Image (spheres, coloured by chain):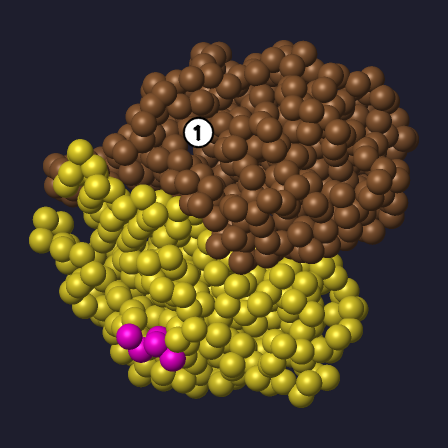
Chain colours: A yellow, B brown
Amino acid sequence: MSKGPRDAVVVTGIGLVSPVGNGVQECWQALLEGKSGIGEIRSFDTAAFRTHCGGEVKVHTLARYLQATRPSSTVGKGSLFAIAAAKMAVEDAGIDLNDIDPFRLGVCCGTTMGECQLLEKIDEQFVGDRDCSIDADLLRFYPPQLIPCNVARELGAGGPVHMITTACAAGNYAIGYAVDLIKEGVIDLALAGGVDPLSRVAFTGFNSMLAVSPEACQPFDLKRRGILVSEGSGMLLLERASDARARSAHIYAEIAGYGISNDAYHMTSPHPDARGAISAMQGALREAGVGIHEVDYISAHGTGTAANDRIETYAIKQVFQKHAFNIPVSSIKSMIGHTMGAASAIEAAVCALAIDQGFIPPTINYVTPDPQCDLDYVPNHSRKARINVALSNAFAFGGNCSALLLSRHA
Amino acid sequence: MSRVVITGAGIVSPIGIGRNIFWSNLTGGVSGVRATECLSYPGLAGPIQAAMVEADLSALLPCRQSVWNGTRTTSFALAAARLALDDAGLDLTTLNLKTVGIAFGTTLSCLSLMSRYDRQAIEEGPRLANPGVFPDTGFSAPSCRLSVLLGPCAFNVTLSNGETSVLDAIEYACTFIRAGRAEMVLVGGSEELSPESMFGFANSRRAKAKATTDGQENPRRNARKSPAYGEGAAVVVLESMEHAQRRSCRVLSEILSSSSTCEPLRIMDPRLGVHHGRLAVQNALNKAQVQPQQIDFVCCGANSSRGSDAVEARVLDGIFGARKPLRTAPKVVLGDSYSAGGAMQVVTASLALHTGVVPPTASKDPGQLRRGFTDSGQASQPQIGLVTSFATTGANAALVLKSADVAGC
């Protein structure tokens, strides 16, 4: 493999685990058809909650990718999702990792809640039996870095392994840093993305903040009522363009740049002037050397909360000026819910697919326009379009803002 | 490529708050490890040997701790950041905060608050859950509080890589400074001890004890068979050499290089990963263009656990051969504070380079002394130091630091 440090970094493999389906074909087709993956939550009892809906992955459909994985008692659900998505990405890239120096293969992963379901089990045991028959092994497998470590173990990776925990923007951070590591010559290949299993703590938290919609997620709609907590994983196989070309690999898109910033304002509310969001988008454009008129599609953070969608729209208009009204902006969270740390990784994959396939997935459940959200949100139906440049926004608790810019690789 | 230097250090540790008292106690061999009863949890027998921060930090905090729901991880982080900024002679009100970033390492972070939040919701019903608590339960909450309360906004990242988190955060920060995305970065780590974390550590320790029947070399063969855990935070100010020179500030050390690898099978068998660890150290030395014989001391991640100490010892023996540079293991007196431990190692190494004294490993174990661990503070005028960390989950990280005098700062 070449070690050219400033070669472009490209996406050659995609792995998707989501409530609307797993793998590129199934998930992409469902998104283009505007299918919803939302339903009543089954993995825990929601009777005492205000709301009962969310997105859940059909775990049994991942069996093919998890046959060699160690028993689930020592591998949390987050690891299982990430392992499956990573193996899909490797398979999709058509690469034989046995041909790769393991120390040149890294894993960068992002998450919001990590393996929180293990802590939740301990808490249930604690509350149920204070004299204690707590399953002590559970907490041993709680630390979030075990997720990328388990991915590395399954793939035989020996290079840097990172878990970035910047909540709902974590996938973008992980992908961006993996690109940095390849460009710096630290590694040649990376599995990068995000993961989050459905978490009762997250469901409790967002419900307590009255930020969860009772049924449908309606980004940018006047009557939007909040997010839908969901789960999934998105993993990208990243490598240098020259390496991809040398092995005649299919290149979905190039990761042309990224920008990250922080509002430095509030733990949950976005800055009223969208300071961080604007800075992140401008940073991504600057790093990629792309002008505002070149952007063909924006994958919005688009959570369906009143504040996010209004501020994100404002930020896009500030960055793109009049051109903002010409850019299709959609949110796949309307279909798969908010997969937390996985969200931006799945959305990055969607941007790569939009560039590669020439379609834009829709924002479903869009009924009533909001005067404050007045862009083209690709309502309810996917759209055929040639996409050369796509921008993927992701924002998070604590004011963390990110934007990843993908482009057609020449 | 920009050279990156450390110009300030702030520390909240079991042996002192602020770098002067910390350094005085560390070089004096003062231990913060005590028997404590305050970490009880079902199934956890007390008292427990632990190094806890007992000082009142309120004078160092920007507002009342209730603002961040009292999580000590966040309190430690804020106090250490304030001390680091003061130490670097920085006033945030005069800085362009768009050029200042934060790279933080914490892994258990606010585990205790999250668990309490969850248990309360189970017991009293989720409709009574306090919406103001949830945002402070996240892994990134301490780091984000730094931005929200202090203002740096170039970027804010949290790495949750266990013991190697902060060495990895330093590499992240250096990447951002060199790429021109930030001029200055606050890099640190913070962890709190809680009944929940101690329960996890205790179980992990049992698991390791079961797995370790190795008979391998162990730098702590006659010492404790398991770590004493600790807590606290340390933050260092990183900036480009040009930036530091522009403001004519004192430089503690220069970061020459860092490197990391991972042997993910180590979670199953703590003896594994010597080759991977050696590669991390060798890569760091190669990137720094430094020969092993130029390393004057090693600030080890050794924490008295059989598995990872044995790996570290074998890695260092492989790198240095018969020549044994001074080795110091601050966790012996600070306890193993998980992600924060790496930050404390970086501060220790920087201060060793700055003051010319390598602190002792406060142990009387002859096995350690034979292997090069310092038994008293040694005024050896070190010029280049190596920091190593070998995580229980398999990550290995190494950092090479250079004295500011040698670096021509």
Mark 1 lies on residue: B192
Work out whether A192 lies above or below B382.
below
Task: Identify which residue is drawn at 44% across, 29% down.
Answer: B192
Residue at point 68%, 65% (across, down): A104
Q: Which residue is at the front of the view, A209 or A174?
A: A174
Residue B159: tell me if it is visible: no
Does residue A83 appear anywhere in the picture?
Answer: yes
Which residue: 20% across, 61% down?
A43
- Residue A62 located within the stretch drawn in magenta: yes
Vertical position of residue B381 compared to residue B322: above or below:
above
| Amino acid found under the numbered disc labelled 1 | Glu
The overriding secondary structure of the stretch rendered in magenta is helix
Query: Within 10 angstroms of label 1, few (less than 14), some, or many (20 or more) residues?
Result: many
What residue span does the magenta drawing correspond to?
A60-64
- In the image, B211 versus B259, the foreground residue is B211
Q: How many numbered discs, if any?
A: 1
